[in-house]
Amino acid sequence: MDFLNSILVKPFADMAGAPDFLLQVLWEGLVAGVLYALIALGFVLIYKSSRIFNFAQGIMVVFAALTLVGLHEKGVPALLAVPLTLLVMFILAVVIERVVLRPLVNQPDMILFMATIGITLFLVGFGEIIFGGENKVMITEQLYIPTGSIEFEPFGGFVSIEQKDVTAVVGAILLVAGLILFLNRSKMGRAIRALGDDHQAALSVGISLSTIWVLVWFIAGVIALVTGIVWGARAGVSFALEVIAFKALPVLMLGGLESVLGAIVGGLAIGILEKLFEIYWGQPLLGGNTETWFAFVFALIVLLFRPQGLFGERIIERV
Amino acid sequence: MKTLMRKSALLPAVFALAAALGASPALAEDAVNVTNLSYRTGPFAATGTPLMNGQRDYMLMLNERDGGVNGVKLVYDECETGYNTEKGAECYEKTKGSSIVTQPWSTGITLQVLPKSNVDKIPILAPGYGFSPMSDGKVFQWAFNPPASYWDGASMILKNISEGNLDSLKGKKIVLLHLDAPYGKEPIPLLQAYAEKYGFTLLPIPVGVKEMQNQSAQWLQIRRERPDFVLMWGWGAMNVGAVTEAAKTKFPMDKFVGIWWSGHDGDMKSVGEAGKGYRSISWSLPHSESSVMQDIKKYVLDAKKAEIGEGEFDWVFYQRGVLISMFTVEGIKAAQAHFNTKVVSAEQLRWGLENLKLDEAALKAIGMDGMIAPFSTACNNHAGHAGGWMLQWDGAKFVKVSDHITADAEMIDPLVQTEAKKYAEANAPWPINEECKM
């Protein structure tokens, strides 16, 4: 009975008993969710247009953030360092397309996936040679990102919201909105979607595979830079940022590899639910650190009922 | 910026190639290989890199200044593990034929190679880390964790936060915020023993590797639990993440204390003023004006033999890396003298590491007085139990804020013996050197 009480009653009583704390938990979950969605978007875009699961997305976040901070360390003003970093990410996209992807056109998906592991290993070594392995400070203030906190006292309690988290959420929303507009309204965006739907058909109507691949890898680079700035502002810029890419995997399982909407909804759902579960069930009953597995278990349960994910396309194969 | 560092890292490869080609038989004879299972890449690179730099630069300096150790060149080599246990085990297998010492650089890798040390007869040197019961040299004949074990560190922290009166902890709540890895879990048995004896509540809160940079859940729990102190066994980005969250939740920094691997200038610089007041126990003290550091500056840095990051020379971790290499070098010297030989073997180095005598005079002679407390090792004491000091972040650097603190042997020794015995039984047949014959 006590056990059932601790699972079914106490967590909700705790939520009702300290609504300010619940608000704080929900806010932290929302921020985490937005950031997960951002990482997942990088994967989705590349997969959608090329059927490549980009293992290098995590290291691209590190590389973009280190380039930005590194350029600033060399004396480049912060606001100039941003376009220069974007230029570096564009060059990286061109090099990846020319050197890695183009020679592997028509190879099985697994070969392309393995190639992205190669890109990861290269960028780890290359990044270490150029920037070193030390932790660097994100140029938050130089980028005019506010760093204070907003505090208020709802229900007689206390809630603190970091201004940089608010900036992250707003920035992510704008980025996603821009991306959706681009994919749906622009010619290039429609070309990306066409390539995702049917390679052969898209090529037959004159869509250039190499141009689109450069474009999506560049957009993934832009997302990587935004992700790097946001996460780097929280805990510094180092190779440790690479591991946050793994947080996107359950989001992709949940939302589907090809759905922009899935990445957003999946990211938000996992961010909020894993935080609620950790605070009200994980820590009191399981000793904590449930965030390492909760998202995967949750995604697995969803997959039992929807194997293609929440928003993925159902694959129908005639035999 | 760090490109010269890589150039110096190529030196061992050049030595090895020259030896392989037979270009210099004398070089091959008069050199010892000291491989480091390092990690300059991956999520923990930020904390590993300055330590490895310090280790490498001390050996480079000795090679430049003295021609090595008593005429024997030190071939400092690295095998990159990325702090990954599987890669560490691979590195061990790859280097065990050439290196006279194994420096695993992670508690997980130490635990992997520990059973192999009895068979391969290569000493494991894990300064200030690894499995705490390794200090019992009768059971762990090939493993060394000088100058202090994690349990020493936990004991020293408790002594400091209770201002020497452990009874004052009665009724208090202490959180252990730890990396969810063998390293982070290491102090739990001792802290539990303390909690039972002195009547405080211990609440371990694990942080997964993927959660290191977003510890909001852990710090929400801390906010809810309202502990009197938070102790941290953090590593890499976890340290920055934790101090950032502590500042965000307005947890009093002077109630937040880390083990020596959670006191890294590079991490704290990311936090800056917000981390002011944060403390970390340390078995080493940075002393940039010491003669050894000045020699490193003269023979290595000024000579452009290696390049380190801006300000890194003064960092706690860089200078701790220097001390860590010193343990190996002093072990080699002791073995050379005892066995009356120049090029020592792994087995001879084991004897050297078991007979380190680093008193005030010895530390002064090697230019390291003031950087570490004097200590010695013996057959039944592979940790040395040198003690240490509490350091505090002043917003720009770590400063010493306590007198010398020693660990509480009465609490630690019985647990060391029990856990060492348990390990030996679980890994039977395990050789035990009861009479200290070796």
Image (cartoon, coloured by chain):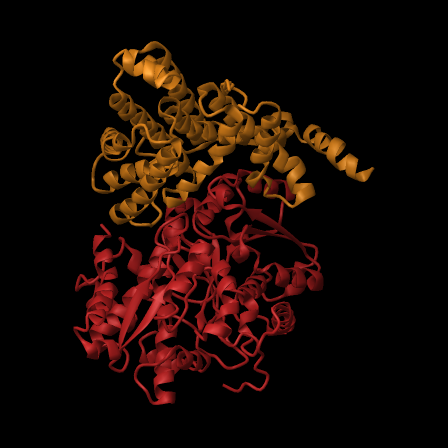
Chain colours: A orange, B red
- Residue in the picture at 37% in, 38% down: A114
At 44% across and 53% down in the image, what residue appears?
B84
Residue B46 lies, in percent from the top left, at 37, 51
Q: Position of residue B144 (x, y in %)?
A: 48, 72
Question: Count of labels shown?
Answer: 0
Instruction: Tell me: residue A227, above or below residue A205.
Output: below
The answer to which of B298 and A240 lies nearer the viewer is A240
Q: Residue furthest right?
A: A1
* Quarter holding residue A79: top left
- Residue B118 visible within the image: yes
Q: Quadrant of residue A4?
A: top right
Give coordinates of residue A258: x percent, y percent.
Answer: 44, 22
The relative height of residue B261 versus residue A54 in the rendered view (above or below) is: below
Residue, x 63% and y 37% (percent of image)?
A: A279
Task: Single out the residue that lies furthest toward the front.
Answer: A319
> Where B395 sits versus B356, above or below?
above
B354 vs B172, nearest the viewer: B354
Q: Quadrant of residue B305?
A: bottom left
* Residue B402 appears left or right of B206: left
Q: Is residue B143 visible?
A: no
Q: Position of residue A286 (x, y in %)?
A: 67, 43
Q: Is A279 placed left or right of A13 in the picture?
A: left
Q: Is residue B306 left or right of residue A217?
A: left
